Image (spheres, helix red, strand yellow):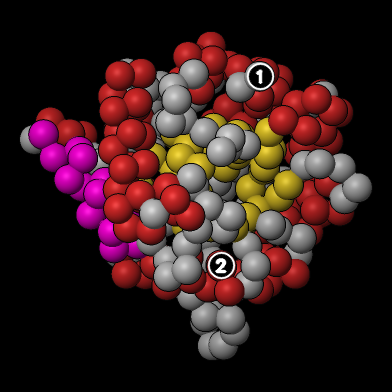
Amino acid sequence: MTRKMLIAGNWKMNGLRADAAEFQAMIDRISTDQFESHDILICPPTTLLAKFASIAEKTEMNVGGEDCHWEIAGAHTGDISAQMLKDSGASYCIIGHSERRANHNETNQTVKKKAEAALQSGLIAIVCVGETLEQRQAGDAMKTVKSQIQQSLPKGANFNNCVIAYEPVWAIGTGETATSDDINQMHGCIRELLQEIGGEKLSQSRILYGGSVKPQNAKEIFSGKDVDGGLIGGASLKAKDFCGIVAGAS
Ligand code: PGA
């Protein structure tokens, strides 16, 4: 079975309406061939989601949310539900990004509930996992990532509705990337774990790498046999960089 690469941009808390021009430039620069052979996604802040969805309409570009609440609706001031994201045009949602785990005290249990809400609303969940520098230095990187996956994978996850993003915390926004050997070893280990948990239906889920992916290192990172694309932060804000990364996947 061949897995379609997913190149996903995470804009985080960046972007104003004027930056729609950058998003439009990405759509214009990515070739028909690239859109056919990969899934391409930008997750902008929620304020821009509906606008980006309307720009992307009738194109192959996908848009997604950066987080969602675990309930469909209710008294949760400031929160956004998966259903609202879907209604705004999203087809994916990033769940349990390490910045949310750290800054909003999200646990594996909340990540799991959120991912389940995403699936129920018809979104593809991108469940993020990754070890801290201390955990890696202590030799606990695999153990940490395995337990995050075991505890935060949503019920009903399969290769159609769920993507795993391996993002070592120490590589995010730092300019440091894990070595190809480390990435390939971790991705292989994640694939085995998915097979153990859910057989072929889960093990064929896409596994993305995230953490300081740039046009210069994308090709090497994406060449790993179990690397099915990337989750890109800083370098997804500019069309030139993002398109350079998409080219690295081709
Ligand atoms: P970065 O972020 O590419 O800026 O390191 C990746 C992410 O946080 O998803």
| 200 is within the stretch colored magenta | no
- Residue 79 vertical placement versus 133 (above, below): below
Q: Nearer the viewer, residue 189 or 233?
A: 189
Quadrant in which the C terminus is drawn: top right
| Residue under the point 68% across and 72% down | 84
Q: Residues within 10 Å of mark 1 (few under 14, many from 20)?
A: few
144 to the left or right of 211: left
Q: Amino acid at mark 2?
A: Ala
Kind of residue at disc 1: Ser
What secondary structure predominates along the stretch shown in magenta?
A: helix
| Residue 112 coordinates in the image, percent (x, y) | 39, 67
* Residue that badge 1 annotates: 250
Q: Is residue 215 left or right of residue 102?
A: right
Rounded to the nearest angstrom, the CA distance separating label 1 from label 2 is 29 Å
Residue wearing tag 2: 118
Give the crowd class for mark 2: few <14, some 14-19, many >=20 residues within 10 Å: many
Cβ(mark 1) to ligand 1 < 8 Å? no
Give the magenta range: 139-152
Residue 75 badge: none
* Residue 178 position by quadrant: top left
Q: Is residue 78 visible?
A: no
